[in-house]
Image (tube, rainbow, N blue to C red):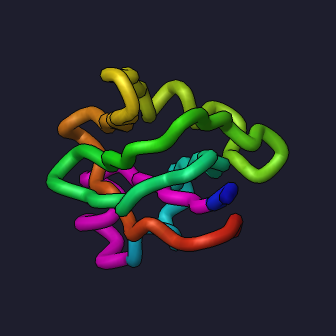
Amino acid sequence: MKKTFSFGAAPRSEKIGNAAKVNQCKEFKSVTVTAENAGDVTTHNDCVTFECDSFGIVEEYSTPGWNEVFSYEIKERRVIFRIPGSYILGKVIPGHH
């Protein structure tokens, strides 16, 4: 079964300086992913991790330049998205936003 979810990040300096929510920052970047047979999606500090059989980026629902903030690696069935330390990770949201 396919699962679609989105997550984003904003520069730490903008979030803290404006006392804004991550998704309200001007420099907010998000990525939307669709994954086949996705397991639990977890976040920890600067990482979003999930297991799946296959996945893809849904470019039309992702922010232009998302790949300037997010990088990812695949280890067997585990996919790990990372952000730089100068960014703050927002919540994982089911679907796309």
Magenta stretch containing residue 18, yes or no?
yes
In the image, 67: left or right of 61?
left
Magenta stretch containing residue 82, yes or no?
no
Q: Position of residue 1 (x, y in %)?
A: 67, 58
Q: Position of residue 31 (x, y in %)?
A: 59, 47
Give the answer, above or below, for where 18 lies relative to 6. Answer: below
Front-lying residue, 43 or 63: 43
Task: Name the residue at 56% across, 51% down.
Answer: 37
Give the answer, above or below, for where 77 lies relative to 75. Answer: below
**Residue 21 is drawn in which quadrant?**
bottom left
Task: Name the residue at 37% across, 48% down.
Answer: 50
The quarter of the image holding the C terminus is: bottom right
**How many circles with numbers are drawn on the protein?**
0
In the image, 13: left or right of 68?
left
Q: Position of residue 58 (x, y in %)?
A: 74, 43
Give the extent of the magenta segment.
5-20
Front-lying residue, 15 or 1: 1
Task: Name the residue at 44% across, 33% down.
Answer: 69
Task: Name the residue at 59% across, 34% down.
Answer: 54
